[in-house]
Image: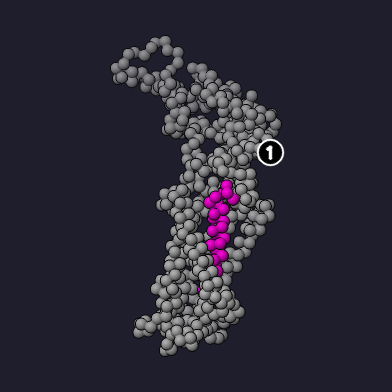
Amino acid sequence: MEEGKDYYVRFSWYHRLSHFVMMTTFIGAALTGPPLKYSYDFWAQAMMSFWGGVHNAGLIHRVMAGFMVGDFVVHLLYLAYHIVVRKAKIIGPDSILFWKKDLLDLIGMVKWFFDRGERPRFERYTFWEKFDYWAVFWGIAMIGTSGFALWFPTVTGRFVSGIFLNVARIIHGDEAILAIGWILFVHLYNSHLRMNVFPMDPVIFTGKVPIEHLKHDKAAWYDRLVREGKIKPE
Amino acid sequence: MVGGARNSARELAKEFTFSSGRALFLAFSTLLIVVLAAAPAPAAGGAPLPQNQPVAPVTDFTQRCLTCHSQPYLGQVEVDGRAKSLFVDPTAYKDSVHGLLPCNACHTGFTPDPHQMVSNAEFFAQTAGEACRNCHDDQFEMYKQSYHGTLSRSGSAESEKAPLCVDCHGSHAIQKVNTLAYRQGIQDVCGRCHGGREATYLDTYHGKAVTLGRQAAATCVDCHGSHSILPVANPQSTLSQANILGTCRRCHPEASKGFTTFLVHITPTSPKAPLVVFLVAMFYLVLIIAVFSFGGVHTLLYIYRGLKDGLYFRKGGH
């Protein structure tokens, strides 16, 4: 592509590394956890044999969990750094937090789906990207906490009633359904299989988004970047 | 002594009749045994058999019984409305832990003509329970004190349902209880009477891990006990308030009192579950439906719009 020479670096090396760790540990955990949950299914038994039994699968699952939670903790430090040291705005066009525009964008998207209006002029993060982010944020908090509670059940029992182990089991399993289902059926489509980037959007691995694409995909952000002099107008 | 077995045995004895066909078959096969027993002796080239040996050698005895009882077409008799097979799978028997024992080690009190015993109800009662005692006295004493043992002697209507040794362990194909295959089936054995409990057990980590081949994970008997099993309400039970911590600590040495309140036999989505468990389960049910509805509809509409505009196949649109 001609416009391929003209890129904007959307994701820093930290963003890319963080996503890569999240992606690989997620896949690892998602391949070792569900066979236990669905122990009665033939595929679960075949998968468990592949890992070499419950013990080995559990070991891999915990190693994955360790790196994933590590990634999460580093991200919390990253957020703290940006908010405390760099004085980043909590609410605004560069923030991952939901704001009023997201609701308007959602309504705009529904209108656009049915050809009743123009596609919303998105800012830096679309509402589905924010949803992806907060799904992971919430997901790790819940699945991580419940996972550690189940990993060390006797420690859990020292602080709370054993019924919380029942609760942790529900949270861990149902969060897993949410996470795996969301990644497979929503995230992969919205990020990679959507029009124009089909069959894959490499931006999360390269960090670079073609300006030509950015102009259409996130018009409001493009305009702002031009205004701020960060990219040259086409 | 063992009421349930005695009653069943009486029924069996009443209904056990030989057809003339079976008698003929027995006579013929007895003749066959005599021929077969005689034949290998010269071939082996050993000393001649003792003339006045009162009891046949162990394997020979088993072989004699199996001549008839290894025939699958031997048929069945009806006991308490249930079909009881007269067939003994010789391979399964030889592979069982008792495979080297002669039949009369358990089927005690045999006379040279074994089938005189059939008319004797005592014989079946002994076999069903007391015969085990000859070798497994400790286990039998524990069983006698257990809920199952007490129930079997109670003489109440329920005593018929009380399990005897063979009801849990099986008989001719009896296996070691610490094998993976046996442990994987324990909940089905208990579930025959305690229906529904096996499903909730299989939904716990213990049940799932055993299903997937982790032999050490707990089964029914590891928590409830086996031969000396008692209701949880009984202070002597392994799961009574006084004993449960010790039972958990057999596998989880660090267990505390809080740990023991984990509930195995609950269905989280049932209102009968503890409130917090039920509410969390319901919350996630609603959350999963809401999140996937939102994400799914958005994705489908996005695909719809993309296909409608043919945007998958050209650049420059959205």
The magenta region covers A128-156
**Residue A92, picture quadrant:** bottom right
Is the residue A198 above or below the residue B54 in the image? below
Is the residue A65 above or below the residue A218 in the image? above
Does the magenta-highlighted stretch encompass residue A152? Answer: yes
Relative image position of residue A10 (x, y in whole percent): 44, 77
Q: Which residue is the extreme one toward the right?
A: B156
Looking at the picture, tell me which residue is in the foreground, B220 or B305. Answer: B220
Q: Measuring 50% from the left and 68% from the top, which residue is drawn there?
A: A78
- Name the dominant secondary structure of the magenta segment: helix
Q: Which residue has dot 1 on it?
A: B233
Q: Secondary structure at mark 1?
A: loop
Relative image position of residue A106 (x, y in whole percent): 57, 78
Does the magenta-highlighted stretch encompass residue B247? Answer: no
Q: Which residue is the extreme one toward the bottom?
A: A234
Could you tell whether A52 is left or right of B265 in the image? left
Looking at the picture, tell me which residue is in the foreground, B164 or A32. Answer: A32
Q: Measuring 47% from the left and 79% from the top, which residue is drawn there?
A: B306
Is the residue B76 above or below the residue A109 in the image? above
- Taking the image as drawn, is residue A173 in sight? no
To which chain does the residue with label 1 belong? B
